[in-house]
Image: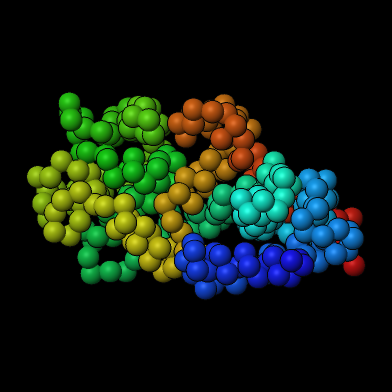
Amino acid sequence: MDDGGLVEKYLEHVRVQKRLAARTVELYALDLQKLSENAAKAGVPLGEVQNAHVRRWVAQMHAGRRSGRGIALILSGWRGFYAWLGREGLVKSNPVQDVRAPKAAKPLPKALSVDDAVQLAEFSEDAADPWLEARDAAIVELLYGCGLRVGELVGLDVQASGSAKGWIDAQAGEAHVLGKGSKRRTVPVGSKALEALRHWLDQRAGGRAAGDAALFIGRNGGRLSAQAIWARLKRRSLQAGLATPVHPHMLRHSFASHVLQSSGDLRAVQELLGHANIGTTQVYTRLDFQHLAKAYDAAHPRAKRK
């Protein structure tokens, strides 16, 4: 059977025997077309493709700027094809078996500029509901001012207790939170966040469901959910005039990036964020360099290209 016949028989196998979706079969066909073209250029039939051929083709795809994820998907299709050929007794070994795609670069976390973060923090909505405004303003100040995860924020109670996951000691200016892996940490709370928190507690005391233990509660009482905070923050950021909708973790990234820009102390940022591994925190050095590179490109007379 020629190469075209092998491919067609395999596609029939995945379509009929494995009952894969039509779109998946279509993608497999495109991947195997690419394999057939590469094999033809190398002057070898599909049944005689070697590991060295596959590695060379991966290198070519990578040089052509195909993403690591894209290459991995193609290799998966090729690997399945040769596994089937092996079961049919048509090849002795799978030339794709030990070939891996290049690691995809981890995307940088999205952080706000200092100006945008301050614009969001200082935004005040002219609303008829001061209770809601005070609550949302305190949420923004704590997320940005303390670098809390949204789960840590949701877990805060008004007062410390044996059952409390977290609380804020306004006298000491500290937030005590329960982070990932049930690890507790203490984070300093800035003056602006404490001011917003006091205002919220004043509103909360005379408002709805004031007896609930949770620091942040919904309109009808009960602890505010993470999903509700996402929705409120997205709405508030757009109302504040920011170009990009903001989510809670973006404020955490902004907190870390801005503290690192000002202090240069990576270990301190690690402690504040509650990262177990310094490697997790090091991504913010890349964000810091990206910020410096943009400033250089914008300001230095020899940086601009004609």
Q: In the image shown, does 58 or 65 lie closer to the viewer? A: 58
> What colour-coding does the image apply?
rainbow
* Residue beneath the point at 20% across and 49% down: 223
* Residue 34 position (above or below residue 184): below
Whether residue 74 can be seen here: yes
Q: Which corner quadrant holds the C terminus?
A: bottom right
In-image side of 116 versus 142 (left or right): right
Decide which of 153, 137 is in the foreground and name it.
Answer: 153
Q: Is residue 69 visible?
A: no
**Residue 145 left/right relative to 260:** left
- Specify the quadrant of the image occupied by residue 132: bottom left
User: Residue placed at 44% from the left, 68% from the top?
Assistant: 238
Q: Residue at x 81, y 53 (%)?
A: 48
Q: Position of residue 297 (x, y in %)?
A: 79, 56
In the displayed structure, would residue 132 be above or below residue 25? above
Q: Is residue 285 left or right of residue 243?
A: right
Count of number-bearing discs? 0
Where residue 276 appears, as percent x and y from the top left, is 49, 27
Q: Position of residue 143 (x, y in %)?
A: 40, 46
Q: Quadrant of the N terminus?
A: bottom right
Q: Quadrant of residue 264?
A: top right
From the viewer's perspective, is residue 260 above or below residue 45?
Answer: above
Viewer-nearest residue: 43 or 302: 43
**Residue in the picture at 70% in, 53% down:** 90
Question: Residue 244, how many percent across, how many down?
Answer: 51, 65
Could you say which is closer to the camera, residue 18 or residue 258? 18
